[in-house]
Image (cartoon, rainbow, N blue to C red):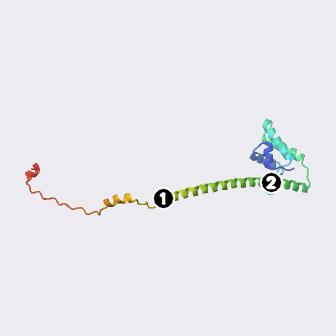
């Protein structure tokens, strides 16, 4: 049975980047991983066990990462068995089917989130339309002519006499003498 990188990462409780690092080191030692049509690695049970052994050895502190990888690659090379080609394609098909199922689940989740967003968007638009309607009604009230009442018209009409131009007053010439004007007499 073939496993995907996400499955291996979850089983080993490591980050996908760590798994890629260990896999690349194993490939440098001559281990060839099967790949999906998208070039993602697929892992066999023996490769899973080898990576698990690398992690255990490194965490124990007995050997360095490089030594643990060399040891694991030797063990993998000893246990290599050539499987019929049909088996490989069956494993790849199973892994691809698993990927399709995961993608379908993700797509359904995204569609549900999009529906929720659409509903919220419609609600916001409806609230905005209500506010616009209220503002337009208020604007109409402000712009509407004020009905005139007869009580108010009467005093206004008496006050509204035609304004006449103010009379120009010409000052009279003061004919008093200088000292009289100074002493205001």
Residue located 87% across and 56% down the image: 89
**Looking at the image, is 98 positioned above or below residue 11?**
below
Q: CA distance from mark 2 to mark 1?
A: 60 Å
Q: Nearest the camera: 50 or 139?
A: 139
Q: Residues within 10 Å of mark 1 (few under 14, many from 20)?
A: few
- Residue at the extreme front: 150
Q: Nearest the camera: 121 or 12?
A: 121
Q: Nearest the camera: 160 or 1?
A: 160
Q: Nearest the camera: 155 or 139?
A: 155
Residue 171's image quarter?
A: bottom left
Residue located 77% across and 53% down the image: 105
Q: Position of residue 72 (x, y in %)?
A: 84, 43
Residue located 78% across and 48% down the image: 6
Relative side of 79 to 114, left or right: right
**Looking at the image, is 116 positioned above or below residue 14?**
below
Q: Can residue 35 be seen in this snapshot?
A: no
Q: Position of residue 51 (x, y in %)?
A: 82, 44
The tag earlier along the polypeptide, 2 or 1, is 2
Q: Position of residue 22 (x, y in %)?
A: 78, 46
Q: Can residue 52 be seen in this snapshot?
A: yes
Q: Position of residue 125 (x, y in %)?
A: 61, 57
Relative side of 29 to 121, left or right: right
Residue located 59% across and 55% down the image: 127
SS state under label 2: helix
Q: Which residue is mark 1?
A: 141
Q: Which residue is mark 2?
A: 101
**Looking at the image, is 50 positioned above or below residue 96?**
above
Q: Residues within 10 Å of mark 2 (few under 14, many from 20)?
A: few
How many numbered marks are there?
A: 2
SS state under label 1: helix
């Amino acid at each position: 049975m073939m496993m995907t990188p996400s499955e291996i990462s979850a089983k080993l409780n490591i980050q996908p980047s760590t798994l890629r690092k260990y896999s690349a080191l194993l490939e440098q030692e001559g281990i060839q991983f099967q790949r999906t049509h998208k070039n993602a690695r697929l892992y066999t049970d023996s490769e899973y066990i080898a990576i698990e052994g690398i992690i255990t050895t490194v965490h124990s502190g007995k050997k360095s990462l490089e030594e643990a990888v060399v040891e694991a690659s030797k063990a993998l090379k000893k246990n290599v068995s050539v499987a019929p080609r049909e088996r490989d394609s069956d494993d790849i098909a199973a892994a691809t089917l698993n990927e399709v199922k995961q993608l379908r689940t993700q797509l359904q989740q995204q569609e549900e989130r999009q529906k929720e967003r659409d509903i919220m968007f419609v609600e916001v638009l409806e609230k905005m339309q209500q506010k616009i309607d209220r503002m337009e009604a208020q604007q109409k009230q402000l712009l509407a002519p004020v009905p005139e009442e007869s009580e108010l018209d009467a005093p206004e009409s008496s006050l509204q006499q035609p304004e006449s131009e103010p009379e120009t007053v010409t000052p009279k010439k003061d004919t008093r003498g200088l000292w009289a004007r100074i002493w205001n007499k």
